Amino acid sequence: MTALTLALVAGAVVGLALGGLGGGGSVLAVPALIYLLGFTPAAATTAGLVIVILTSVTALVGHTRDGQVAWRTGLLFAAAGIVPATLAGAAAGHLPPTALTIAFAAVATVAALRMLRPPRAGTTGTAHPGKAGAAGAGLGAVTGFLGVGGGFLAVPALVGVLSLPMRRAVGTGLLVVTVNSLAALGARAGSGTPLDWAVVAPFTAAAVLGAWDGKRLAHRLEDATLQRLFACVLLAVAAFMLIDAFV
């Protein structure tokens, strides 16, 4: 398969994940860019942020139209993560590629295990501001350090910590992903990491289109089914990355 074909296929999968689950885009995009398209870990994490930002904004529009975005909650949650995301993003450029790969695989594994837990029924209650701030700050650090939008962790946190219903958490998670990714990308702006736009552009275009399909698919399947499927994909990606790092 040519690089263009691989970029289009991988982009569509990333878009389906973001549109349907409100997260997971970078967890799939970064390994695809590294192992399928030959990007370095540094270039892949930066390109992953670009892809996720544009795709998340597209998916966010659709969820906003359905009234499934808690704007105030999402902005407060994301604001707590901006500074940690910026600091961690700047520090990540000084770490060896192997360390980033191992850390990325570890986070993907944790996210998968969280998704495999029995789903909790969300309510519209209000969480303690301290807990929301701590969760948002931790998510921001992960976003900046690993170059991921954090949606695969944001959605469980929005359900478990802020007590949002699952579908509303998905839409709000996209808002958190967008804000955190912008902060992390800003920290990497002066790193001088070159990006192959001949690959990134079609990858992003396919992801944007896939996000709309993912949103429609999510309405046809049960939340638990989507979570289990995505968790299996995350575990497979994590295993592959760990094997590659140590072999």
Image (spheres, rainbow, N blue to C red):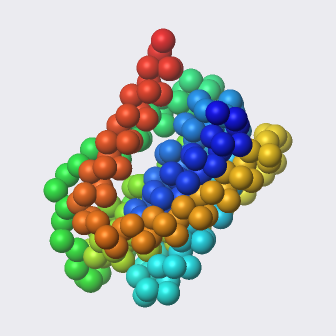
x 71%, y 52%: residue: 202
Q: Quadrant of residue 43?
A: top right
- One can see residue 84 in this view: no
Residue sitting nearer the eye, 132 or 165 = 165
The image position of residue 148, as x and y in percent, is 54, 50
Position of the N terminus by quadrant: top right
**In this view, 178 is above or below 11:** below
Question: Would residue 99 appear left or right of 122 to someone viewing this image?
Answer: right
Residue 55 x, y percent position in the rendering: 60, 63
Query: x, y (%) of residue 193?
Result: 79, 40
Q: Residue at x 78, y 51 (%)?
A: 189
Residue at 45% of width from left, 64% of height from top? 214
Direction front: furthest residue: 1
Residue 150 placed where, x, y %? 48, 55
**Residue positioned 59% across, 30% down in the render:** 35
Return the residue found at the far top: 247
Q: For this view, does 142 lie left or right of residue 201? A: left
Give 54 or 72, whichever is nearer the viewer: 54
Residue 239 in view (yes/no): yes
